[in-house]
Image (tube, helix red, strand yellow):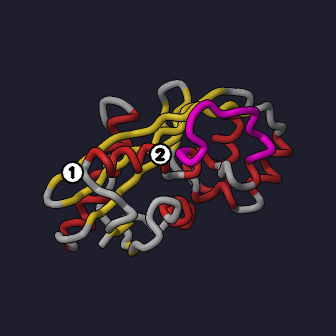
Amino acid sequence: MIILASSSPRRHELLKKLCPIFKIQSSDAPEVQQADSPKILAVENAKIKAQSVAAKNPDAIVIGADTIVVLNGEIFGKPDGVKGAEEMLARLSGKKHEVITGLAICAGGKIFTDYEVTEVYFGEMTAEEIKKYVTTGEPLDKSGSYALQGGATKFIEKIHGDWSNVVGLPVYRLRKLAQAAGINFEEV
C-alpha cells in the first residue's frame, strides 16, 4: 500500500502519473521552521510528514513532500493573509527565484530522501495586477503566494527545471528516488 502524506489536490494529481492507486493521509506533525539551508529545510519537513504517517502505517510505503519558494536565500512559505500575499508577489515581481521540493519515502523501516530545485522567472507585475490576482483567493494557501498551474501563469516569463516541482511534486525526481529505494510504483 502506498500513502501520500499530503492533502494537496495538486500532489494527488501528479502522483497519479506514477501510481494510479494510493491512499491519502495528511500529517499533523509540526514542521521545522529553520535549517542550515532551504534544501535541508524542505527535506527535513518532507521526512517529518512521511515519518509521522509511517508511524501509524508501518507496512505502507509513505511519500512525504514539502515545497518552498526561495528568493535570495529568504524562504517564502504560505502568505499571512491578503496583505502578505500581495507583499510576497510584489517582491517576486521581475525577479528569478527558486522552488525547492524536499521528498521523503518511508519504506521497510528505512527512509530515502532527495530534493528538486527549479528556477522560476517572474515578469514585472503592477500593483493592480497583483491585487486582482490575490482577490481570486488562489495565492492564499500556496508557498510564495502563487500557483504555476493557475492564474499566475500569465506572470511567469520562464522556468528552468521541472515544472511539476513548481506545482508541488517533482514526478521525475520521485520516480528516481523510488527506484533507488527498490520501489516500482506500477507493481505495488
Residue 20 visible in the snapshot: yes
- Tell me which amino acid carries mark 2: Tyr
* Residue at 29% in and 59% down: 50
In the image, which is nearer the foreground, mark 2 or mark 1? 2
Quadrant into which the N terminus falls: bottom left
Residue 90 position within the rendered picture, expressed as x and y whole percent measured from the top left:
71, 37
Answer left or right for 101 relative to 129.
Answer: left
Q: Residue furthest left?
A: 109
Q: Residue furthest top?
A: 72
* Residue at 34% in and 46% down: 177
Quadrant into which the C terminus falls: bottom left
Residue 62, compared with residue 167, is above or below; it is below
Q: Label 1: state its secondary structure.
A: strand
- The residue carrying pointer 2 sits among few (fewer than 14), some (14 to 19) or many (20 or more) residues within 10 Å by Cα, namely some
Answer left or right for 133 relative to 110.
Answer: right
Q: Label 2: state its secondary structure.
A: helix
Residue 9 position within the rendered picture, expressed as x and y whole percent measured from the top left:
55, 67
* Residue at 25% in and 49% down: 181
Q: Which residue is mark 2?
A: 172
Say which of 162 and 43 sits in front: 162
Q: Which labelled disc corresponds to residue 129? A: none
Mark before the other along the chain sequence, 2 or 1: 1
Q: Is residue 154 magenta?
A: yes
* Residue at 18% in and 67% down: 55
- Tell me which amino acid carries mark 1: Ile
Residue bounds of the magenta highlight: 153-165
Q: Which labelled disc corresponds to residue 111? A: 1
Residue 61, compared with residue 179, is above or below; it is below
Residue 110 position within the rendered picture, expressed as x and y whole percent measured from the top left:
16, 53
Residue 45 visible in the snapshot: no
Residue 105 lies in what quarter of the image? Answer: bottom left
Residue 162 position within the rendered picture, expressed as x and y whole percent measured from the top left:
56, 40
